[in-house]
Amino acid sequence: CDSQHTWGVSQSLRYEQTPGARDFQTHANPVTVENLIDWVSQLNVEGLHDSISITGGEPLLQGNFLEEFLPQLKKAVNLPIYLETGGHLPHQLSQILPYLDMVGMDMKLPSVSGEERWYAHKDFLQRCANSDITTFVKLIISQNTDPADLEKAANLVAEVSPEMIVYLQPVTPLGELTHSGEILAPSPEQVLNWQGEMKRKIKQVRVIPQTHKMIGQL
């Protein structure tokens, strides 16, 4: 997760040896660029993959490492590079923009995540727009989402590029409860209303559930 409260550094990691087989090996953390290139190359079955995702945690916390890694990755594997990020580290983004093909930015809504990063998000999106790479914005929404946050988010995206796609992603609790015992998922009425309001300023606003939870990839 790219929310700061979830961050922690593990002393080890797992890497898959065969695509989709879940035949994991354990390795000490951190790893070298050479290790990663070898692992990715091993998984690069011809015709199977459409892109390589750089995700986390928050991958841009490792900006210096990515600046070294991505050029070598581009040489080793001829696939587009997709960055999944919380979108609040614009300077680190600039380090690696030349090596990226796509960016998915998770915009934080204070009423949902407790984080407020409007200025950094605006700077981040503007740098993406200036680089002319494919960029979309994702907003996690819940029963507690403040419509004022969504309005602010819509204004921010529209000022950068009203053509940029925004995904509303309802919290998908699948039995998870808050401390008060209330499920956080928004109602269909809330979601449709928020989508309609945002589309007044942004051309494409789509709704998609947290599919990773639905297929057990937590």
Image (cartoon, grey):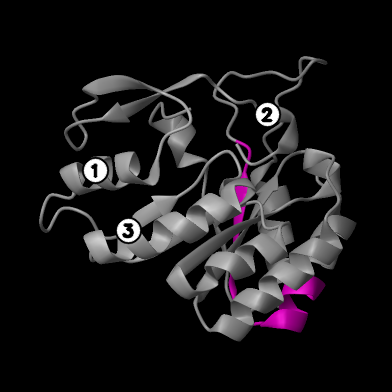
The magenta segment is 154-171
Q: Which of marks 2 and 3 is nearer the N terminus?
A: 2
Numbered disc 1: secondary structure: helix
Along the horizontal axis of the image, is 111 left or right of 55? right
> Circles 1 and 2: CB distance less than 8 Å?
no
Q: In this view, does 77 lie above or below 27?
A: below
**Measuring 70% from the left and 40% from the top, which residue is drawn there?**
186
The tag earlier along the polypeptide, 1 or 2, is: 2
Q: Farthest residue to the left: give it.
A: 46
Q: Mark 2 points at which residue?
A: 6
User: What's the residue type where badge 2 is placed?
Assistant: Thr
Q: Which amino acid does label 3 sit on?
A: Leu
User: For mark 3, what is the residue?
Assistant: 73
- Could you say which is closer to the camera, residue 73 or residue 148? 73
Look at the picture and state if 81 lies above or below 37.
Answer: below
Question: Which residue corresponds to the image point at 51% horizontal and 19% vertical from the top-left?
Answer: 11
For mark 1, what is the residue?
A: 38
As measured in the structure, the alpha-carbon distance from the residue carrying label 2 to the one carrying label 3 is: 28 Å
* Front one among 5 and 73: 73
Location of residue 151 with respect to 211 vertically, above or below: below
The residue at the far right in this view is: 148
Quadrant of the rendered image containing residue 39: top left
